[in-house]
Image: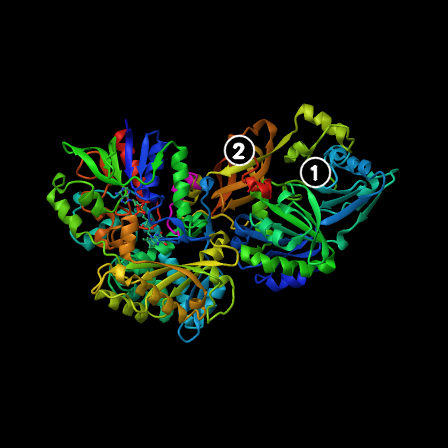
Amino acid sequence: MPIPTPFHAKTSALTASHEWSNWSGFLAAVMYEPYHEHEYYSIRNSAGLLDVSPLYKYEIKGPDAVFHADRIMTRDITKCEIGQIMYTPWCDEDGKVIDDGNIARLGKDHFRITAADPNLRWFQDCGYGLESEVVNVSDELAALALQGPNSRKILKEIVVGADLDKLQYFWLTEAKIDDFPITITRTGYTGDLGYELWVHPKQAERLWDIIFETGTNYGLSPFGLAALDMARIEAGLVLIEVDYNSSHKAVIESQKSSPYEIGLGWAVKFGENKFIGRRALEEEKVQEPEWTFIGLEIDWVDLESLFSRKNLPPQVTGRASRAALPIYLQSDHIGQATSITFSPLLKKYIALGSVRTNAAKIGTPVKLEVTVEYTRQAVDAVIVKPKFFNPKRKRSLGTDE
Amino acid sequence: MNKYDAIIIGGGHNGLVAAAYLAKAGKKVIVLERRHILGGAAATEEIYPGFKFTVFSYVVSLLRPEIVRDLNLPKHGLTILPLESTITPLPDGDYLYRDIDHHRTLRNIARFSERDAEAYEEYSRSMYFMAKAVKYILGIIPPDPTSLKPKDLLGLLEMSKHFLGIGEEQFFTLFKLMTMSSADFLEEWFETDPLIATMSASGIIGTFLGPRSPGTAYVLLHHYMGEIDGVFRAWGFAKGGTGAISNSIAGAAREFGAEIRTNAPVSNVIVKNGKATGVALENGDEFLADIIISSLDPKLTFLKLVEENDLPSDLVESIHKFKIRGSSGKVNLALDALPDLSCIPGPGPHLRGAISISPSVDYIERAYDDAKYGEISKQPYIDVIIPSMIDPDMAPPGKHVMSCFVQYAPYELREGTWEQRREELGDNVVNALSEFMPNIKDIILHRQVLSPWDVEQSIGLSQGNIFQGELSLFQLFFLRPASGYAKYNTPIRGYYQCGSGTHPGGGITGTPGRLAALKILKEIN
Ligand SMILES: Cc1cc2nc3c(=O)[nH]c(=O)nc-3n(C[C@H](O)[C@H](O)[C@H](O)COP(=O)(O)OP(=O)(O)OC[C@H]3O[C@@H](n4cnc5c(N)ncnc54)[C@H](O)[C@@H]3O)c2cc1C
């Protein structure tokens, strides 16, 4: 049975839809209103607020903390400056991805990691022989993601002791709201301008109220997982258990993926760093990975015509779909779309997925399986870069605007 | 030398769509717009510092998906935000609320009539089938009916039956839609007065008719047109107001190479030996092209931009008769705070949707009665939205803008002029609103009142008719604007039309512009 997060008194009062899902054992609103479209648009048009407390949070501390973190992560943690955050996968000895998340350097010998899955045992084991410790701080931190074009304006009104105009993408700052301390990271899972706010759980409700008081003037809306899923697909961000499987959970070898196969090759660095799985990945890089992570743009006109043959309007799920669908090149099965959504913003039907590397060229016309009135059909689609939406404001500074 | 392949007169959204399609096809195109900004009836302006008004049109419902795709308008900034509810406040403090929550809507209707709640679903289904039939018509260049010779309405309908391949029963419903009044048509389905009133109101928008006037039922269909496009529907509020739609189309047109000039009023089309060769601006500058396309209304296109003696006399006569009576006004308010509805006090999602001042059919019909005799409606029908609740960038933080579409405001007043009586319209609107929003008078920071005369002055729409000609059956399809000239052509070679005065008519659809461009491209290639 899922349990409440520190924001539950606030979120449950607003969840008119009564639609909850179980996120790592916590109650997480799927949507607040009866329909998620307004929440989705709050992320892209004004500002949205998401309770991300169910994330697993770990800290690595001690004189060998850098060395320890660097052993885990494929990014070069030796280059991570104090106050900086790196998004990175971590792998097993064979270079297969276990999980992905953000690692923030809070101090010289102090890191904080967010993860989708429990990772304490793995992180501790990776530190074998080192003078450092890993602690699970999940229960000590309540967290909110404030995302969208107006998120900075809202924060600027309520935060003291930090210059948010200068806070860069993937950096953090300590500050105060009211009289309690807060860590603000310029991170999120929407591909938009946004921040994540980390406080002690006893401040959670107060934080929620303060953000709402000011946020209302900027079109703030709470949003749930349905809206989040659409936004993260537009941004091309992978989701564990949907777009790939943790190598710790895979049942068969072919269910595992390397970072190269899920679009995270850019986050694998071969420098001074020495991380678990490096040798395997060095080899894979030369040979070329079996799978490539891709975006798909589904041809709406073709979809319309498939449905109109049955005298129906095109029917697609209003929410993002996680039911994987096969992708074909001529009659060859070359891969699968794993996350599919209609993007109301872009007015495009889009998907993320993987195809065999030899068929993954951008611009390749392919077919995607769809079901039209109980019959299997194939709709035209084209392979594109797995990043449909990437606004300038995501990275720009307040002082640029 | 100012020599182009095509010149488009008027930078409203249809002119811009035509320009974008022609430029996309590789033509050298220029758009000449009289005003300092683009968009015509789809324009956003900061009328009061910090407050952006979607000055004329305010919602988008019929912008065609193929245009959004062909021109990739989202890339150029088009974002359609959802407008998910309609509330009709009632004088007794009650209200009728309909929104995207299906069951809540049915419960709300059932408070008035359980039968109506059930009929509501059936009605939507029936309208869906009708809309599907009509959508086809909206997307095609009107065929030439002369071979079929439909002399009367029945002939015309028989022909559409033939075109659309619809069955007897649906044909019968279509016939009713084409001929009945919106109130009568809806009364066949429903018994709840505020429901009938609010729904029938969409049938009178832009017409000089009341909910009980025959021929107003047809427009009811438009509300269901979006359903056919599934998730692609474009029903809502454009981020940045309707001006943002025009700007996104202009962005696409420019990317394809079109040139767009503002502050460039055209005085006339240059015609030599029955062929259009260019245009002259009011300042005397001349631009030459083999193709001249007017996006202005039929009166201006035929009676102002060219000489009557370049046209056949029967056409001149039809255009003189073309009905373009202005009947609507617009009141835009800058507000210091949110209005409070007495039926649901305080903020809430109901303020993100439409607020319809249409408590009963009689209320609207009485508003029409005033107008019939040249009076401003004392208690007008008002369609209200609060754009800043949907797009907070429309007003400073915590402040709001309110858009009030008003009927009726007859272009021809029995007494006085609009210049003298403009504010009376504003007063009637604010008074009517204050019946339902007790705090409205205290929160108004600025008020912009636009009578049909003002609309004519600012964007040139003759008599301020919002659709460049009423959407009545006798002015639709191959009769729009005149028999024989419904295919975007004119009797003058090289001179074309592409505004809302052509098929399929007014509203932000982009279709006249697109179909005209496609027709022209086919002719010249
Ligand atoms: C008050 C009002 C409210 C409305 N509300 C809605 C709504 O909510 N939703 C909806 O879908 N539709 C609405 N409409 C209708 C819709 O806005 C119009 O049908 C549509 O925008 C017309 O577009 P157009 O390009 O055909 O013509 P216009 O927008 O009329 O464009 C014609 C352009 O030509 C320019 N022009 C005029 N004379 C000259 C000249 N001599 N030389 C050069 N340029 C010239 C004008 O300035 C104008 O920019 C509304 C209209 C009005 C007036």
Q: Which mark is residue A88?
A: 1
Instruction: Give the CA distance from mark 1 to mark 2.
Output: 25 Å
Say which label, 1 or 2, has the lower sequence index. 1
Within-10-Å neighbours for mark 2: few <14, some 14–19, many 20+ = many
Q: Which residues are magenta?
A: B60-73
Q: Chain for mark 2?
A: A
- Give the percent coordinates (x, y) of residue B149: 16, 47
Q: Is residue B165 visible?
A: no
Q: Secondary structure at mark 2?
A: strand
Question: Regarding mark 1 in the picture, which secondary structure is present there?
Answer: strand
Inspect the image, locate mark 2, and give the three-letter code of the amino acid beneath it. Answer: Ile
- In the rendered image, residue A396 lying in the magenta stretch gets the answer no
- Disc 1 residue lies near ligand 1 with CB under 8 A: no
Amino acid on which the number 1 mark rests in the picture: Thr
Subunit bearing disc 1: A
Q: Is residue B352 above or below residue B365?
A: above
Q: Which residue is mark 2?
A: A383
- The mark tally for this picture is 2
Location of residue B259 with respect to B485 vertically, above or below: above
Q: Nearer the viewer, residue B69 or A65?
A: A65
- Percent of width and height locating residue A306: 43, 42
